[in-house]
Amino acid sequence: SSITFFWNFNQRSTSATKHTRDVDNRQSDLQPSLETAVRLALALVYYFRLPEIEDGGCSPHTAGRKAFERLMDALLPPNQRQGLLGFRQFVDQQVESFVSRDNFEIPPGIALNQAVRENIFAMVACFSMKMPLGVIGAPGSSKTLSFHIIRDNLRGQHSPREFCRQFHAVDPFPYQCSEFTTSSEVESILERALERERQYERLGSKSRCLVFLDEAGLPNERKMELKVLHPYLDNAKVAFVAISNVQFDDANRNRMLTVLRSVASLEDLVVLAKGCLGISSNDSVWLDNAVRGLCKGYLKVIKIHSNHFHYRDLVYVCRCLNRRTPSGANCSLNPHSLLRALEENMNGLDEAEFRDVVDIFFQAISAVTLDNFAVPPAADFRDAFDTIRQSLQRSHRDQERCSPELMPRYKLIIDPSEDNSAVRLLFDLGVLAPEVQARGGQGTHVFTMSDFDTDCSDLRCAEMVSRIKVCMERGQTILLVNTERIHGSLYDLLNLQFRKLTGLEGGEERVFANLAIGAQTYPCPVHPEFMCIVHLSQRLLPRTPAPFLSRFEKFVLSTNQFVKLTVRQLSTPDQQLAEAVEVRARSFVEFIGRSNFYGFSESTLSSIIMSRVSLDSSNHQIADRSAKHSVSGFDWRSMFCQDDQGLGNEGKVAFCVRSVCAQLLQLVPPEVVIVKLRNVRTRDFYYQNYFGCNEHFKLDSFLDGLLNRDESRHPICFKHILFARTNNSVLGLTSAQCFPPWIARDLVVKICDRDNFESQVAFEQSLNDFVQSDGQRVMLMVVATRDCSPGHRNLLRQLVDRHADIANAVRGASNRRAKYFVMLFHFPAQDLLARPCHPAIFLRGWEFNFFDVKAHDNGIDMASLAKRLTRSVDSGDRPESEKSDELIREDSNRILSGESDCTGLKKYGNDMLWEFLLRARLTMPENCVVWEDPLISDLQAIYDDGCRPAVRMDALQKALEPLDVLGRFGQAFFTGRERRYAVNRLLETSAQLVEGRDRVRVGFIETLWARVRGDYVQFINSALQRLCSDFVLPSLIRLIRTTSGEGFVDSYVDEILSAIELPTVGSHDAPQNSPFIGLKCDLGFVPKLPVFGALHQSITRAWDAMPSGGDQARETE
């Protein structure tokens, strides 16, 4: 088929002077021959699909083009009819003759290099033969551009060149592939093209359909979405062209011809650069050498950053230099203009890497031109914020005066953070106009997509593309955040592949770009002032398709960059103070361990320091809106309440460091605080700040503190993010009824998952209802991080920011009370081993805390006990002070007696009594006369195994109630000598959690309670065993019911406690309790009773007090 096509084409072109050219300055025309057709057919079918030898993708077992050229020169040696040209020279000559500006209308600024010529040549030939074609090459290798040139030139009799009128008119059926492409969409576009092709054949039309698959390498190969192509490629009933950045699979590649665009040569890049610059080789020798040096520098850069830069970046560097040239003047390449072109088109790197890129380009140009083409001074380099701001301003000016081919690219913001900090900085610094709150308003239109089911549907994607279309037509600025699902619809727009169309009325010329919605593609008008900005997380950069990245000017915006720019504007003393605080705070982070800070990122510390800086500048406004100070400088006084009189510089640094570290410490779990700070000299300050001044255990106490906050000192709406490990307590937070009534009346709880909200609109409605309500003041949003992506969490935060601003505005207008937004991010602890949690960046009034949400109704307030026991942690074995003992004793008495917000030991003590009675086996002597005493006869049921358990339980509770032995035992366990054991258990549990030796990572409090519970149960069982054996309990009850025997009870309880041996701390073995407790009951108990001992002492004292007389008299007395 190929031989026939080229034979017929040569015959038709024999008389066409457009196709003939001189060979070696001779005017003899190349005569059509079979050999010419064979050579071109071999080139189209075999030669173009081979890689160049220098291509890194060419394996040792794969022959390249050089080997094929040698083979063809041997089989078809050069002859006089072919001009004595080798195979490659002959093919290049024919392709150049075929694709020229005389034969095709080429837009200005487009260079006809080897890539463009081969692509157009192969596409026209395969289109004419209805032979499937695949074009494979790196981004920027003119694949899509070649198709657009064919589409605009092959229009039958309406073609702009006589040469193109001999071919059929192209009726394009484009389809934009993406990661979300489905086989049904591909089949739909092919079926529509086949139906149209049949109509053309029935009507005898000179038009022919061409199916064009753009970026066909993006669909998931594992899903085999392109397998549907097989029958259509085999039948070849319609022309087909697919372009891709990667090789097709073997099944598809064997069914089509292939043109492989390998690594471009230096000469090809020079031709490309000159075409984009609009210069020729005759303009200037120095400029020609400078362009060659520019291309050499580019080849060095892409070897280092092969996944970041592509051919399109070099193209737009040259176009940027062309735009900066005054109209009518020759292009001038100077250091300043080149630096500005590199800042806008070869960026997207951190500061050090970009400086290296600049050095490579300038050194390459200097080496070729032999001039001192020096890098401009550091003062000429712009920061990222100024670069993006000036680039946006210049883009609007250039779009008005430049042709579509020379328009600057759209912008890609690379965000190193995980919470979209770059987006907030764009608005806070005035780089972008304020966000539009309603459709049709003026400003920046922000488009975001959530993980809610409705928002992931095709209908929602089509709706968003439709809204973008309206912004395109009106010339508005759009910002795309977390919109990966619709990027495939915008590829043609982002590639700046515009078509010029003249309107019927008035002859106004407008530019159009294709927008794809599923299998449909629609041309949409593009206003010259339209600007598209895409936000991309740096985490997603490695897996972002290269064709997408190459379409943008790339910039990295981070909080750290803004902090550096802010600090530079401070006075010298303030700069030194801020730098010293940052250095010491980073050493504190390394001491605690970065992994122990939940949500810690590279911008966390910078954001805290930035909140202490207040600038009064029109160029740089403070991003933290919660800052109260408008005076320029480092606001170190806001870090503490001490009087600053007499403080030197070292004192300021110490106080600032302590304040920053205390704020950082709120991100650390309690077990880490206990272990890491145990031997720190200032541990008392951090313990008091962490456990005393801030809440990390009780969510209801935290919310109650918000509701009772002094609003006169906190005038703005507060937003909090709480990090928590997933446990039953967190999963049980489903409504406000889970909290005490005085909190529930002001609280609204929302579970932010797909089951509770169908779409982003529904979630926004709940936020709006909360803002407009008069009674609700706190909104708690529970978010399971495992079930939602980082982009979804950032969207929720963005919506909260928007409605928090509305709440502040409403409050200022109606004098309402403040609203509080609390987001609880919970995640399984084991997830931290594989991925970090949500970053903690203190911007726009957000505050962050780690929360160890305790389990409900466990009987003992372990959270409060943990706080009090922490006071006993010291660096050695020194005894605690009396004051510490008294505080812990008072707190323990309050907690154990049920006066706190927990239930005390009463509920949990009943469970232990049941367990004790079910395991106890009491044996009584026969004919025991003890129960004949009416004072203790009601206790007989305790020792009678034949009684029902409920009766025995009731009797035991009545007996223990006046003694309050459970309270006494509990106080002894947590406040007596056993308190040191409890403190050691606290330290042991914390150390095991920190070191990862404990696999039960459900939370510090729950893990601590699981450890203490077993020891506590064993302790109580041992005490009850000694209390109930040998009829001690009836004797004590009889003593209390007859006389005031509290002193005897206390002494015997102390005796019981002193006889109990606690398990060894550090042992992981469970207490070895026998299934039954055997209690011996006989008359041997009498000498052991405290009553017997007291009576014996009384008799002894009376005997000793009697006057010495006869023994008989004394005995009688």
Image (cartoon, helix red, strand yellow):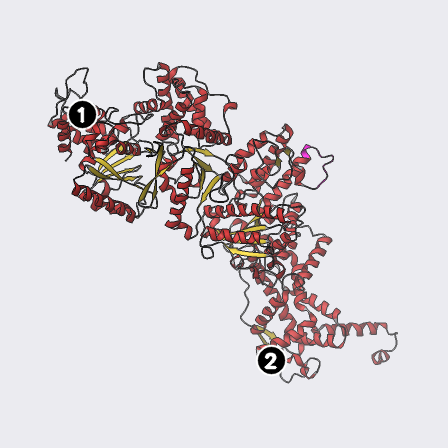
Above or below residue 222? Residue 1074 is below
Res 827 seen here:
no
Residue 400 lies left or right of residue 52; in this view the side is right
- Classify mark 1: residues with Cα within 10 Å, few (<14), some (14-19) or many (20+): many
Q: Main secondary structure of the magenta part?
A: loop
Residue at label 1?
87
Give the magenta-colored segment's residue range. 641-650
Identify the residue at image location x=67%, y=79%: 1083
Q: Is residue 700 left or right of residue 425?
A: right
**What SS does tag 1 mark?**
helix
Image quarter of the N terminus? top left
Horizontal arrangement in the rendering, residue 1060 relative to residue 188 (left or right): right
Above or below: residue 93 compared with residue 1080: above
Is 97 contained in the magenta span? no
Q: Where does residue 323 sit, x and y in percent of width and height?
A: 40, 24
Q: Residue at x 67, y 68 (%)?
A: 965
Instruction: Give the mark nearer the N terminus: 1 vs 2.
Output: 1
Give, as a three-letter code, the residue at label 1.
Phe
Q: Nearer the viewer, mark 1 or mark 2?
A: 1
Image spot of residue 610 (x, y percent): 59, 37
- The numbered disc on residue 944 is 2
Residue at 47%, 57% (x, y): give it: 756
Please name whichever residue, 321 or 848, is drawn nearer the observer in this view of the structure.
321
Residue 1090 versus residue 527 in the image, above or below: below
Single out the residue that lies furthest toward the left: 34
Instruction: In the rendered structure, find residue 341 and report the number of the disc placed on it.
Output: none
Q: Mark 2 is on which residue type?
A: Asp
Splitting the image into 4 quarters, where does residue 256 fall? top left
